[in-house]
Image (cartoon, rainbow, N blue to C red):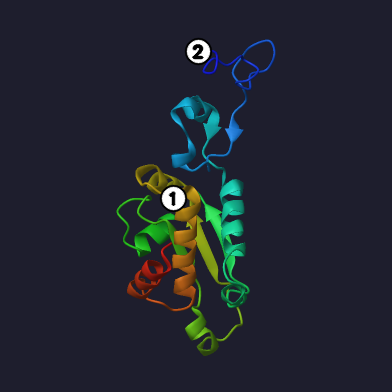
Amino acid sequence: MSETWRSPDQLGRRRGGGVPPPVRCGIIPKEQVEMSDALKWRTLEAPSLAEMEELADEVFARLPEPFRRLCAGVVIRVEDFPTDEVLEEMEAESPFDLLGLFQGIGLAQDEAVAPTGRLPNMIFLYRRPILDYWAEHEETLGHVVAHVLVHEIGHHFGFSDDDMERIEAAADL
């Protein structure tokens, strides 16, 4: 079957042999990888912090404009794991327990707190726990990042976890 055979050049190898350089991607939806494409996974690496931040920026840019406008000044950061202080404060059993965190003054309380000496509102997305969650569930990485980002923005708006669950269920994220 010549259709399943691929030359080294077709596999992306450099002339002269050797393994192709790793491709930094990792955001191919699992359902789009066919059995014949399984070997492509051997050269893929998990997205870097910068790539995950780019994905989060793309997700944020696709949110409705009025929603984004209300998030003016919120900083989105991607880190590998939460700090030890955050894990202790959140009473997490493992660094993989927390996928994201809103840190700051919620929109509902914003006027009640003096702005002097206040850090900007921040949303943290934790890359390694997100990747671990993604590996264990039947969702695309983009969907997981969108879910976590919307959830943390919900904290900025002052929604409870129960409120956000109802909103996410209605929105069919």
Say above or below: 123 vs 35: below
Which quadrant holds residue 57?
Answer: bottom right
Residue 172 position, x and y percent, is 41, 64
- Give the mark, 2 or 1, whose residue is nearer the N terminus: 2
Say above or below: 151 vs 48: below
Residue 50 position, x and y percent, is 61, 48
**From the viewer's perspective, is 163 left or right of 40?**
left
Residue 76 position, x and y percent, is 57, 62
Q: Identify the image quadrant of the C terminus.
A: bottom left
Q: Residue furthest top?
A: 16
Say which element carries label 2. Answer: loop
Q: Residue furthest bottom?
A: 112
What residue is disc 2 on?
A: 1
Q: Are marks 2 and 1 in contact (CB under 8 Å)?
A: no
What residue is disc 1 on?
A: 130
Q: Nearer the viewer, mark 2 or mark 1?
A: 2
Which quadrant holds residue 8?
Answer: top right
Q: Residue furthest right?
A: 15
